[in-house]
Image (cartoon, helix red, strand yellow):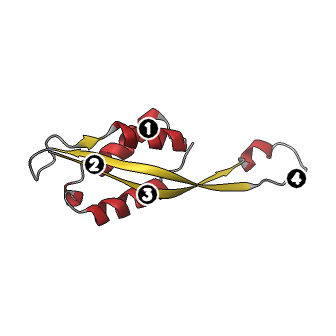
Amino acid sequence: MTKLKFLVAAAALFAAPAAAHDSHKHSHSHQTVQRTVQVVVGCYRGPWELVHWDRALPEFYDSLRAMGYSPAVATSIGNRICRDQNLVNNESALRSEALRVISSTPIQ
């Protein structure tokens, strides 16, 4: 049984929604703020090559929550990454997939 943990740096973009001001005819300048956060990608790997017991570690969920994801989305991302059979024992693929999923999942 192993615990696999590593950090990935993920950029999070935050912007004021433009639709909030569509009802009137003047303009506002909105800033997009980018910050880099560290996400601990941690998965519990059971004793088998198959993903029978695999799950995201609390540190993974906590870092996704700190990034701004809701509990449901953080759980979904953790399950998506840690239960992917193709990522078992492949740390570079796990890191790449975590970055891809995080960067393609908007923070709401």
Mark 3 → mark 4, Cα distance in angstroms: 37 Å
Which SS class for mark 2? helix
Mark nearer the N terminus (1 vs 3): 3
Q: Look at the numbered disc 1 and give the secondary structure of its residue.
A: helix
User: In the rendered structure, which amino acid carries the disc numbered 1?
Assistant: Asp
Residue 72 percent across, percent down from the top left: 42, 35
Mark 3, Cα crowd under 10 Å, few <14 / some 14-19 / many 20+, is: some
Give me the residue at 13% from left, 42% from top.
52
- Residue at label 1? 62
Dividing the image into 4 quarters, which one contains the C terminus?
top right
Q: Residues within 10 Å of mark 4 (few under 14, many from 20)?
A: few
Q: CA distance from mark 2 to mark 1?
A: 15 Å
Pointer 2 residue: 82
Rounded to the nearest angstrom, the CA distance separating label 3 from label 2 is 15 Å
Upstream in the sequence, badge 2 or badge 1? Answer: 1
Residue position marked by numbered label 3 in the rendering: 8
Amino acid type indicated by mark 2: Cys
Q: Nearer the viewer, mark 2 or mark 1?
A: 1
Pick whichever of labels 1 and 4 is earlier in the sequence: 4
> Of the residues under marks 3 and 2, which one precedes in the sequence?
3
Whether residues under marks 3 and 4 lie with C-beta atoms below 8 angstroms apart, the answer is no
Hey, what amino acid is under mark 3? Answer: Val
Relative to 68, is 76 on the left or the right? left
Q: Provide the residue designation for mark 4.
A: 27
**In the image shown, does 76 or 8 lie closer to the viewer?**
8
The quarter of the picture where residue 93 lies is bottom left
